[in-house]
Amino acid sequence: MKIAATIANTLTRLTGVIQIVLGILFWTGNALGLIPIHILSGTVLVLSLWTLAILAARAGVQPGLVALALIWGLITVALGLTQDRIMVNSAHWIIQVVHLLVGIGAVGQAEALAARIKRAHLPEKTASDQSNQNRQTG
């Protein structure tokens, strides 16, 4: 499970960077032909977030955090696929900023879930392990 979580977390980081770079290009009116790549990368990001949510549930992470990540992923997809039709006038920049913040939130949730998954799989130190370590370092 730890390897799967690491892979999913790495994918969210990688796709998050791709999303931000492409988003900046789009906001500046460049590379609009890469919008399908942006959509594909966003889909991979959300699928990775959902993978981490499922792994987190199996690792015993709080159900509320798992549910939030699952719902957040759904919101991310819905906003990403409909944002070009929301507030299409001069206020469209508001939707663009919301889209950016929702995407950053998805990456942040993935990071939090991955950290909790890894923490859940750390071996517990016993009192004798701790005293042995203290003797070795002291």
Image (cartoon, rainbow, N blue to C red):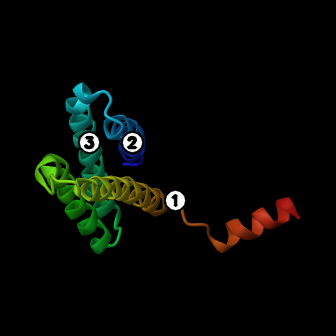
Q: Is residue 15 above or below residue 89?
A: above
Query: Is the residue marked by circle 3 packed among few (<14), some (14-19), or many (20+) residues within 10 Å?
Result: many
Work out how far the residue at label 3 is from the one at label 2, CA to CA, in angstroms. 10 Å
What residue occupies the far right of the structure in this picture?
A: 138
Secondary structure of the residue carrying numbered label 1: loop
Query: Could you say which disc has been placed on residue 122 in the image?
Result: 1
Q: Number of labelled discs?
A: 3
Residue ID at (68%, 65%): 129
Where, by quadrant of the figure, is residue 75 drawn? bottom left
Residue underneath mark 3: 42
Q: Earlier in the sequence, mark 1 or mark 3?
A: 3
Q: Earlier in the sequence, mark 3 or mark 2?
A: 2
Q: Are marks 1 and 2 in contact (CB under 8 Å)?
A: no
Query: Could you say which disc has been placed on residue 100 in the image?
Result: none
Name the residue type under label 2.
Ile
**Quadrant of the drawing holding the C terminus:** bottom right
Residue underneath mark 2: 20
Name the residue type under label 1.
Leu
Q: x, y (%) of residue 123?
A: 53, 60
Query: Is the residue marked by circle 1 packed among few (<14), some (14-19), or many (20+) residues within 10 Å?
Result: few
